[in-house]
Image (cartoon, rainbow, N blue to C red):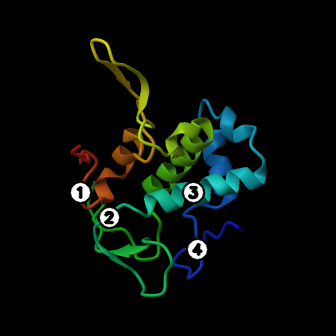
Amino acid sequence: MALDATVGGANANSYVTLAVAQQYFDDRLYTDAWDTATEETQQSALIMACRWIEQETFVGSPATSTQALAWPRYSVEKKNGGYYLSTEIPALLQQAQCDLALALLSDSSLTETGDMSGFDSMQLGSLAVTLRTNAAGIMPVSIKTLLADVLAAGAHGIRVFRG
């Protein structure tokens, strides 16, 4: 699938172009997973990161009824005052997508499925459990923190599962 970062586009599947992502990673440390990936894999990582971000609930309302992605939006206040334009993608959203794409390239366990995907180790005698820092299917805290100002639930909401 081709990367489409058309702002408000009906077929958009990314908030950043490959060129914008590369520019972001040029100024960032520890980007080996991005740097060594093929262009096709980089695009896939960006699309997958965008899909994951799209599962979040954002404040405000979509700018149009025909846009494929949640952004751009109306009535979203900026942290330091004013409002995002209904024609812009916030830099924090683009940064979050890039960072999540890098995390996906760096740690395949983020997308693992299965009942034990959230654990690094487990022991039965005297019950010793080691949880993964980033369990599969749970967005890394650093990404949620970046998005905190535009998420309806904020960055510190947690999911509780009952067994």
Compared to residue 155, the image places residue 88 above or below, namely: below
Q: Nearer the viewer, residue 109 or 105?
A: 109
Compared to residue 56, the image places residue 116 above or below, namely: above
Gap between marks 4 and 3 measured at Cα: 13 Å
Which quarter shows the N terminus? bottom right
Decide if residue 141 is on the left or right side of residue 95.
left
The residue under label 3 is 48
Q: Nearer the viewer, residue 30 or 127?
A: 127
Which numbered disc flags the more N-terminal residue, 2 or 1?
Answer: 2
Point 60% across, 31% down: residue: 29
Point 68% across, 57% down: residue: 43
Gap between marks 4 and 2 measured at Cα: 18 Å
Mark 2–mark 1 CB contact (< 8 Å): yes
Gap between marks 2 and 3 measured at Cα: 17 Å
Number of other residues with Cα within 10 Å of mark 1, as a class: few under 14, some 14 to 19, many 20 or more: some
Mark 4–mark 2 CB contact (< 8 Å): no
